[in-house]
Image (cartoon, rainbow, N blue to C red):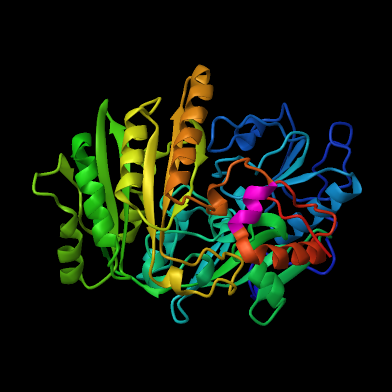
Amino acid sequence: MHWDKRPGKAPDAIPQTEKLIDRERKPMNLNLGCPVLCEGDEGYEAARRVWNGMIDRRPRWIVRPRSIADVMQAVRGASESSLPICVRGGGHSFSGKSVADGALMVDLSLMKSIQVDPRRRTVIAQGGVKLGEFDAETEKYGLATTGGVISTTGIAGLTLGGGLGWLMGKHGLTCDNLISADLVDAGGRHLSASATENPDLFWAIRGGGGNFGIVTAFEYQLHPLDSVHGGVMLYPRDKAKELIRQYRDITLTAPDELTAYAALLTGHGTPMAAIAMCHSGEPVTAERETRQFLLADAPIADMTGKKKYTEIQSMMDFSAPAGLNYYSKCPFLRELTDGAMDTIIAHAAAAPTEQTQVVIEHMHGAASRVAADATAFGLRRVHYSVNIMAAWDNPALAESCIAWARGLATALEAFGASDTYVNYLGDEGAAAVKASYGPNYDRLARLKHKYDPENVFRFNQNIVGAA
């Protein structure tokens, strides 16, 4: 990426800008032209909060950069002051690793530039952009790329971890559509990563998470997309087995254009089973193929039809409101057997709260055909991820909710449940992180040693450097 041709150029030397630091309260060696917050400052409480209400941590300082130069100086200042660094993009991870007690948080939420090039079908977006903002801008040009399924998710964490989403069958993961990136490394230097510039780093950031630096801007390939066919169908819970079996049978031979998830959830006190889907193919074919999910009995609600991509991208927002307490487990199944279905349905019937849900996601198509070693994200196969998401608002329920989620994950081991998507990991530890990368882990460990030998960027699903 050649960001120097655009606003927010990363200079070779840091300019001596206005000092916004009260050195008695914040004795860091920073010269920044951006807000810096500490406890007691207006905006500190909101800035330290993340999507998962269970996370309650207090950084020592929160730097809110507006440019690459601000990020560079923040990293250098933290190093000089021996302060740990955490990085917040969208703040949407289950584990809340973007915020750490006593650390300097680099909060990218003010870095919101989005620049679409409709001729080249590319877009450059800064690290603080969220999916809803990104999609709304690219949709103006009839273009899109693979994103997640909750519009408030940040593009940074999504991309760096891989990026499952509605268009992955047709266009691959979000990271597969990454052309280049600008980042600040552990030494506070600006680097660019692409297929031709620092290609080993480019390989690592496509799935390796935030282990290698703070990505300040992403350049993506876009694809023509005027509309899609999809939405949500809701059935009573007693139809769950029939619906999920039909879901499995359809997804086994699904075309690349069709991505569908099955869910067990509760709405207004009523347990339900649901199918959420997006078909990005030709309209007549899309309508016919999405109607296959209908059972003989009419659904409680059928909210499917021709829609804007932004509608599909935000239709699941209601299922994951910010501020609730969340705990997740997400094992992968190569096959969705009848026994696995029965286990999922039985455990869902004993869900500890109405906000708790289980979502079965199908990965296939283009995302599964990429070579496992082509990017750091190596889980390139057709499979189902079982997203077990316990949610609660009463702190007294934490223990029972976490135990329930762990119980279902353990029960699924009998059906071959294994590794997981790194963006869904909680605090399972080093072994789980290593398992998520499989044979790619050793290469990632060597690159971690090359680009961050002191493990400056450790508040993430951390990869341990190895020479």
User: Is residue 88 something one can see in this rendering?
Assistant: no
Q: Nearer the viewer, residue 356 or 310?
A: 356
Residue that appears at 45% across and 45% down:
414
- Give residue 51's position: percent from left, percent from top: 53, 38
User: Is residue 128 something one can see in this rendering?
Assistant: yes
- Give residue 448's position: percent from left, percent from top: 76, 62
- Residue 434 magenta-drawn? yes
Asked if residue 144 lies left or right of residue 95, the reply is left
- Give residue 65's position: percent from left, percent from top: 70, 51
From this view, report whether residue 153 is shown above or below residue 382.
above
From this view, report whether residue 122 is shown above or below residue 159.
below
Q: Which range of residues does the magenta coloring cover?
A: 430-436
What is the chief secondary structure element of the magenta stretch? helix
- Give residue 191's position: percent from left, percent from top: 74, 69
From this view, report whether residue 218 is shown above or below residue 358.
below
In terms of image quadrants, where is residue 263?
top left
